[in-house]
Image (tube, rainbow, N blue to C red):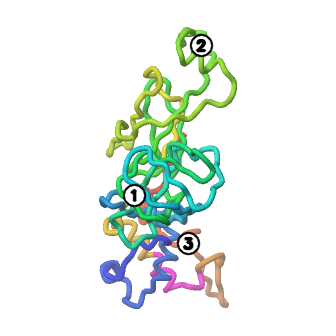
Amino acid sequence: MPSQYLQPSDYNVYGLPTSTTDQQVIQASAMVDAYLLRPEGLVWAPDYLGQPCYMASLVPEMTVESQGTITAGSLVTVTLTNPIQVYEDMIGDVVILDRGSKSPSLVEACVISAIPGPGQLTLYKVANDHGANCTMDFGLTILEEREVSGKRSITRVARPPLRLISGMGRYGYGRRLDQTMGMYNEVNLLAAIQAFGGPPLWVPFDVTQASISRRTQEIWVPAGLLLQYYSEVRLRYVSGYPTSGIPAPIKAATAKLIMAMVANPELIGQLKIIGAGDTKIERFAPSQLDADTLKMLNNYRMAIII
């Protein structure tokens, strides 16, 4: 469902009339998402434990169903009702189980560990038992790939705060300068892997062993093969806030947009200037939000990481 940062109980608090419609709130919330560069929105939906599970505003890229029941356990193979198209980075992808069910106690995020056949998926861990025709939704988490320094295994993501659900890492080919400086032992397994052609393989790492700083949003990634740090990591995570915890600046900005749309509907969209005789009205900026409100929103804007 689309982002909706205000509820009827918020209207009076932020100076909106009780006649405010859901459509106005959705339109203003979409404009906030556009400024924040976060099309997935800021709201996550919970799993069976109340933990962040998936982004509420995202639409599934693909939905499949299980042919039979799914039993809780580790390395659980699920047979699907129909074969699926396998894509390159499906290993490590996250599927949301039973999102469409009427029982919130079943919803959970699971990570794909293998694809035994075109109509099967193997999941690392399943916490709950699920009935036949269990829905499995793809594409409801955020995906980022980041390079990691060779000197320390720390990276950042562009959309904090986060709950890391799946992590993959791979080793890149060594830089020539590092090789000439003797930083690679030519008889170890890592050197043997680098000697063969083809792209490096992505391998999973245990996200429970990763350390996330809530203050700096840095992620320490555990080392992989022979305690070597990965060159790149692929992270799938959920970011944002529950519906009941949307920050006040986001709500205030949404309310201001609604008030601007109601007060000056003729200035919404591409129209910049209107005039009649000696009277002229001009939009002061390409945004309906004032500079102070934009400063408040900047704390939640997607970071540009180089």
Report, in whole angstroms, how far the alpha carbon at label 2 lies from the one at label 3.
Answer: 57 Å
Query: Is the residue under label 3 in contact with that under label 1 (CB below 8 Å)?
Result: no
Mark 1 or 2: in front is 1
Q: As shown in the figure, which amino acid type bears the numbered disc 3?
A: Phe
Q: Residue furthest front?
A: 68
In this rendering, is residue 179 above or below 284?
Answer: above
The local crowd at label 3, few if under 14, some if 14 to 19, many if 20 or more residues have their Cα within 10 Å, is few
Is residue 259 covered in magenta? yes
Residue labelled with disc 3: 284
Name the side, left or right, on which 207 lies relative to 282: left
In this rendering, position of residue 173 left or right of residue 127 = right
- Amino acid type shown at disc 2: Gln
Question: From mark 1 to mark 3, how far is it between C-alphas?
Answer: 47 Å
Corner quadrant of residue 16: bottom left
Mark closest to the chain's N terminus, 1 or 2: 1
- Residue for point 46% across, 58% down: 96
Q: Amino acid at mark 1?
A: Glu
State the residue in front, 237 or 97.
Answer: 97
Residue 270 screen position, x and y as percent: 66, 75
Element type at marker 3?
Answer: loop
Residue at the image position 60 percent from the left and 10 percent from the top:
180
Q: Earlier in the sequence, mark 1 or mark 3?
A: 1
Q: Which mark is residue 179?
A: 2
Give the image location of residue 144, x and y in percent: 53, 46
Which of the two residues, 282 or 249, is positioned nearer the viewer here? 249
Q: Which residue is mark 1?
A: 108
The x and y percentages for residue 7 are: 36, 78
Rendered residue at 42%/48% (across/down): 165
Residues drawn in magenta:
257-267
